[in-house]
Image: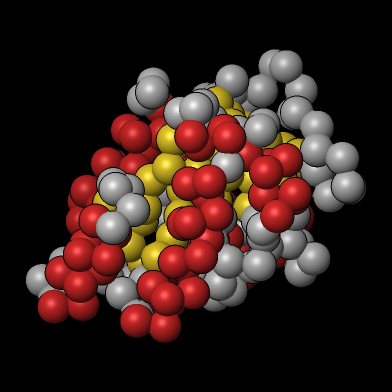
Amino acid sequence: MRKIMVANPKGGCGKSTLSVHIASWFARHDEIVYLGDLDRQQSSRHWLEARPDNLSPILHWDISGDDFHLPPKHCNFAILDTPAGLHGKRLKDALNIVDKVVVPVSASRFDMLATREFFEELSATKAVRKERVDIGIVGMRIDVRTHAYAQLLEFLKEFHLPMVTCIAQSQRYLQAADTGVTLFDSGASTAIDIQWRPLLNWLVSRH
């Protein structure tokens, strides 16, 4: 079983977009997928409720209580969408049950500064120090040809974290959030597939 957490202390950075698309990709490839949501707004859970029955099934991972628990043993991929401000004991508890952490980051200076403390807290946790958990960065709404992208890469060097891929801005992601249908369900273009492929390969890779 591969357990994946999508986390960033800042709201509106694309955590739910990443979570539902990762879940959709693996579900479309006949994997048993569970999607959990720690956010009070329960965006991912509401997205699941809106998901049409004729699409590849994604099951609800009920992890909303105070005690973290694993998804059922027959699960192949479990994706955990997390709230803004995740830190302290709750972050450590989550890190103890996942294998991979995906951190969406934009090239905004404000977003980078907001993420700095989170990276420092991640690097100080036992699960990360002992290399039980892999951390990968996904640039969100970024054009790799811009100076902002170069600045983000320079910022990440400080923490020795890999930039796994960049996802360009598209109105289609906003539409997917309302319908329970991802770009993968509706037939992603070659350009979108190229953007996502490095992340999907990283998620299935071993340490």
Looking at this view, name the residue that lies furthest to the left. 145
Asked if residue 47 shows in the view, the reply is no
Q: Is residue 108 left or right of residue 100?
A: left
> Coloured how?
secondary structure
Q: Is residue 140 left or right of residue 33?
A: left
Of residues 180 and 149, the one drawn nearer to the viewer in this rendering: 149
Question: Up-down: is 152 above or below 166?
Answer: below
Q: Is residue 167 left or right of residue 83?
A: left
User: Residue 23 at what x, y percent from top left?
Assistant: 55, 42
Identify the residue at image location x=70%, y=16%.
74
User: Residue 41 at what x, y percent from top left?
Assistant: 76, 69
Question: Up-down: is 140 above or below 27?
Answer: below
User: Residue 60 at what x, y percent from top left?
Assistant: 76, 41
Q: Quadrant of the C terminus?
A: top left
Of residues 51 and 138, the one drawn nearer to the viewer in this rendering: 138
Looking at this view, name the residue that lies furthest to the top. 74
